[in-house]
Image: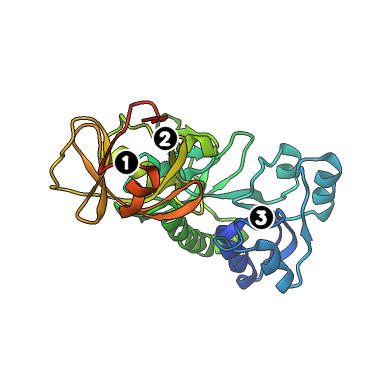
Amino acid sequence: MSARAVVFANHDVGVRCLEVLLAAGIDVLLVVTHHDDPHEALAFASVSDMARSHGLEVAFPEDVNEPAFANGIAALAPDFIFSFYCRQMIGADILAAARRGALNMHGSLLPAYRGRAPVNWTVIRGETRTGATLHYMTGKPDAGDIVDQEAVPILPDDTAFDVFRKVAVVAEIVLWRSLPALIAGRARRVPQDGERASYFGRRRPEDGRIDWTWDAKAIHDLVRGVAPPYPGAFSIVRGRRLRLLKTRIEHGRAHLHAAPSLYIDDGACFLDCAAGGVLRVIDADVDGEPVAAAALDRVLGFQRVLPLQPANEVTE
């Protein structure tokens, strides 16, 4: 039995999951997406390009819940509505238009990490695994019954972008193995355990500000969690914007300075962190310009060692 669907989709997860629907013979009536951001074009796949290459109709509404647009979705009478990384909360009127169910692919192992930017949050908080979850949509974000989910590992030096790539692959796997049961009306529905739920909101570029009182792992996890193509972890040092783009925890290296300090040693740059940990700075930039880590002393104007105050503004 075939099915008709309206698909809300963005980025790599959207492209992969839309490809799964087409491979499974789903009649995709409309693809709803956003205009591609030129700053993201090199990092993320384009849903609109992929959809048009298959001759699908594509819409770019500013507000997916605007009444006229929602009425248009209802007029299509889809069996399913799928959301694959849609940037907007889909309202009740649109969800009700799906005669056989409205489902979302979320980038975490629900009920953990409901909400926005789940991949970034899992890395920032030092998790060692996450995944993709296919679930029914309700009026509450990411709270509906689970159809299926699959885990991926988060390695110690994985960035959020690395993890996002893994999540995109397992999202494809989860959808592919769930579709036959969905189409046949036999898909399982497992209620989420609200006692185990956690919720995280949208991240802003300002949330990447480094707190020098944190230990090495916390700073390393922040760097990984917001590394490009995301805005990056930063601090204002001597009036200049320093971004740490890639770091590594140096296990076993001696901590040389009592206070958090950036220093150059033997042609490399290190960060002595609070609580004794040490990070190697591998990639950085200053005021948006790439800088070799070992040249940060010259660029920032310090002699081998730069103490970092608890506050982010370092003026001396």
Query: CB of mark 2 within 8 Å of CB of mark 3?
Result: no
Disc 1 to disc 3, how far (Cα)? 38 Å
Q: Is residue 61 above or below residue 18?
A: above
Give the residue number, with chain letter if any, for mark 3.
37
Closer to the camera in the image, 224 or 125: 224
Q: Which mark is residue 238?
A: 2
Q: In the figure, residue 4 lies in which quadrant? A: bottom right
Disc 2 to disc 3, how far (Cα)? 32 Å
Amino acid at circle 2? Arg
Amino acid at circle 3? Asp
Disc 2 to disc 1, how far (Cα)? 10 Å
Q: Is residue 251 above or below residue 173?
A: above
Give the residue number, with chain letter if any, for mark 1.
302
Amino acid at circle 1? Phe
Element class at badge 3: loop
Task: State the image coordinates of residue 256 (x, y, percent, origin top left).
Answer: 15, 39
Residue 85 is left or right of residue 233, and the answer is: right
Residue occupying image coordinates x 24% and y 56%: 267
Mark 2 or 1 closer to N-term? 2
Element class at badge 1: loop
Query: Badge 1 local density, few (<14 within 10 Å), some, or many (20+)?
Result: some
Residue 100 is left or right of residue 222, and the answer is: right
